[in-house]
Amino acid sequence: NAGVTQTPKFQVLKTGQSMTLQCAQDMNHEYMSWYRQDPGMGLRLIHYSVGAGITDQGEVPNGYNVSRSTTEDFPLRLLSAAPSQTSVYFCASSYRESQPQHFGDGTRLSIL
Amino acid sequence: EDQVTQSPEALRLQEGESSSLNCSYTVSGLRGLFWYRQDPGKGPEFLFTLYSAGEEKEKERLKATLTKKESFLHITAPKPEDSATYLCAVGGGGAQKLVFGQGTRLTINP
């Protein structure tokens, strides 16, 4: 049972480039989320989804896009990378609301 | 606005020296308080969920408690392998919208 899988683990981008961070879960969880973790800031919610075809914004959504075409996958797109988006990105999933979330091991992203 | 404050930011203990980590919160309608452990280079690992004041949960050397304003993570006779960052989060308007504290970095010296 792989749980939550994130790819890539590391990525370096130049300002203005776009890319997609992949997240997949094999637990048949309805709820999935994307967070970013910055030193001194804690984990902050970017976007979340309560099921296939349904997404909503979190605390820091600007500059990011998401879609949820299947239950298993929840990709995060950076439209035009900026240095302020340098961070560690975590994907998480849970079976239903009020259940604990399971996290992937993160994608470490640097924007030059 | 939901808020979570954890203290202390960092704590260094000797092996066997018990202590407590604090998580103070303000939330409009608590739908769960969650404790996670995070090791360097890894994602948060779920430890406990508490839903109502007075609730307690235990796992090995860890015990989590909850009041209406704060939660404590008690660590009894810790071992070096308990060294990690411990994160507290609350679910308010929809538990999927978790608000995290900044974490407490715990170091246990042998």
Image (cartoon, grey):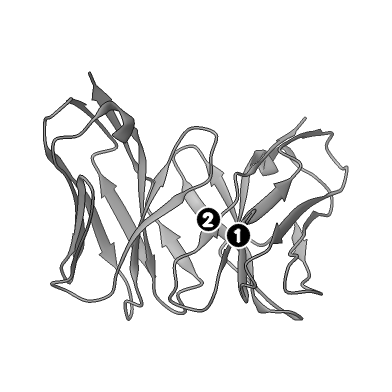
- Residue nearest the viewer, comparing B80 with B101: B80
Which residue is located at x 53 percent, y 39 percent?
Answer: B42
Left or right: B83, with A16 as reference point: left
Q: Residue furthest top?
A: B110
Quarter of the rendering occupied by the C terminus of chain A = top right
- Residue nearest the viewer, comparing A1 with A93: A1
Q: In terms of image quadrants, where is residue B52?
A: bottom left
Q: Residue furthest front?
A: A1
Query: What mark, if any, has residue A44 been given in the picture?
Result: 2
Left or right: A46, with B29 as reference point: right
Q: Are marks 2 and 1 on the same chain?
A: yes
Left or right: A71, with A89 as reference point: right
Q: Amino acid at mark 1?
A: Val
- Residue nearest the viewer, comparing A5 with A17: A5
Q: Is residue B10 above or below residue A35?
A: above
> Mark 2 packing: few (<14 Cα in 10 Å), some, or many (20+)?
many
Residues at circles 2 and 1 in contact by the CB criterion of under 8 Å: yes
Q: Is residue A7 above or below residue B9?
A: below
Quarter of the rendering occupied by the N terminus of chain A = bottom right
Left or right: B51, with A86 as reference point: left
Q: Is residue A30 above or below residue B24?
A: below
Could you tell which of marks 2 and 1 lies nearer the N-terminus?
2
Which callout, 2 or 1, points to the residue nearer the camera?
2
Q: In terms of image quadrants, where is residue B85?
A: top left
Q: Position of residue B29 (x, y in %)?
A: 32, 81
Which residue is located at x 23 percent, y 58 percent?
Answer: B24
The secondary element bearing badge 2 is classed as strand
Q: Amino acid at mark 2?
A: Arg
Which residue is located at x 51 percent, y 72 percent?
Answer: B96
The secondary element bearing badge 1 is classed as loop
Q: Name the residue carrying label 1.
A: A60
